[in-house]
Image (tube, rainbow, N blue to C red):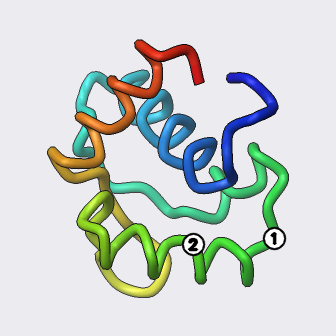
Amino acid sequence: MKSKSTPDERFLIKLYQTAMEGGDPHATFDFRPIAKMIGQKETAMKNIIKHLAQANFVKKVGDTCLYLTEHGCNFVLDAIERGI
């Protein structure tokens, strides 16, 4: 990932990479460990996730879990292709 990517993009890409390690891009994860991996605080991530959910990139499952939607997967694949 290039340093020009936004925290939103870094989070989506890391979520996708983590999900693909298990073989399912739509697997459900707790966002806190992923936020820690990209150096974001939990409170900042809650705001980011709220906006990502409104844009239909992620779907929230409870307070701390979420998964990448098809729209989110397409965004990540496009971002990776562009070299973000």
Residue 65: quadrant of the picture: bottom left
- Disc 2 element: helix
Label 1 crowd (10 A; few <14 / some 14-19 / many >=20): few
Question: Which residue is at the front of the view, 62 or 4?
Answer: 4
Residue hosting label 2: 48
Question: In the image, what residue type sits under mark 1?
Answer: Lys
Measuring from the top left, give residue 56's x and y in whole percent: 24, 65
Disc with the residue nearer the chain's start (1 vs 2)? 1
Q: Is residue 28 left or right of residue 5?
A: left
Q: Amino acid at mark 2?
A: Ile
Residue at (32%, 62%) from the top-left corner? 58
* 47 up-or-down from 57: above or below: below
For the C terminus, give its image quadrant: top right
Q: Residue at x 59, y 80 (%)?
A: 46
In the image: residue 23, left or right of residue 29: left
- Whether pointer 1 and pointer 2 mark residues with C-beta atoms closer than 8 Å, the reply is no
Image vertical order of residue 54 relative to residue 29, above or below: below
Residue appearing at x 56%, y 15% in the figure: 83
**Label total for image:** 2
Q: Position of residue 53 (x, y in %)?
A: 33, 73
* CA gap, disc 1 and disc 2: 11 Å
Q: Which residue is at the front of the view, 70 or 25?
A: 70
User: What residue is disc 1 on?
Assistant: 41
Q: Position of residue 3 (x, y in %)?
A: 81, 31
Indicate whether 74 appears above or below 36.
Answer: above
Q: Is residue 58 left or right of residue 24?
A: right
| Mark 1 or 2: the one toward you | 2
Does residue 40 appear left or right of residue 33 in this picture?
A: right
Q: Quadrant of residue 50?
A: bottom left
